[in-house]
Amino acid sequence: MSSEWNDPRPMSPHLQVWRWHGAMLSSILHRASAIICYVALTIVSLGIVGMMLTGGIPLARLIFSPLGAIGLFVFLFAFMFMALAQLRHAVWNRGELFDPELNNKLSYGMIVLALILAAVLTYVGVAS
């Protein structure tokens, strides 16, 4: 079969063929957000177990440092983005919003909204 293939382009979609667009970025961020959420929730769970065993917050100085605020922001962004992506999937399951141009705009909007929500919640968490 490969001897019959005379098209110089790859047989399957590839990064050299596809140009970046919002839905592609959203799909990649959705997968990365899932990984971040699993790791963060594992760390929180271990922290709760540590609190039960020691009576204090493990690594309290790290948690309440600027590095801890950055970690909180990353976790909140991943969580907010996952929530928005799941909402979009619920709409897709109804058979709506499949137009590629609208979907790309929605993807960029989800990213921006997740960034804003994460920034506000991080500020509220750090300021209190």
Image (tube, helix red, strand yellow):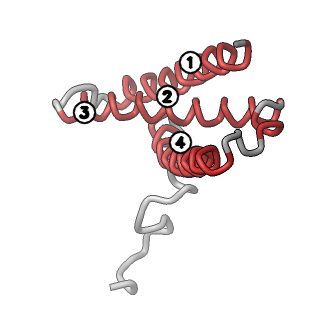
**Residue 106, image x and y in percent?**
42, 23
Callout 1: few (<14), some (14-19), or many (20+) C-alpha neighbours within 10 Å? Answer: some
In 3D space, how far apart are the residues under numbered discs 4 and 3 (Cα atoms)? 18 Å
Residue 43 in picture, x, y percent from top left: 61, 49
Q: Earlier in the sequence, mark 3 or mark 2?
A: 2
Q: Amino acid at mark 3?
A: Trp
Q: Which residue is mark 3?
A: 92
Direction left: furthest residue: 94
Q: Which mark is residue 91?
A: none
- Marks 1/4: CA distance? 16 Å
Q: Where is mark 2, residue-wise?
A: 80
Identified at 59% across, 46% down, the residue is: 52
In the rendered view, does 37 fall on the left or right side of 98? right
Query: Percent position (x, y) of residue 110?
Result: 48, 24
Pointer 2: residues within 10 angstroms few (<14), some, or many (20+)? many
Say which of marks 4 and 2 sits in front.
2
Say which element carries label 3: helix
Callout 3: few (<14), some (14-19), or many (20+) C-alpha neighbours within 10 Å? few
Picture disc at residue 117:
1
Could you say which quadrant of the image residue 58 lies in? Answer: top right
Q: Nearer the viewer, residue 46 or 35?
A: 46
To which residue does mark 4 refer? 29
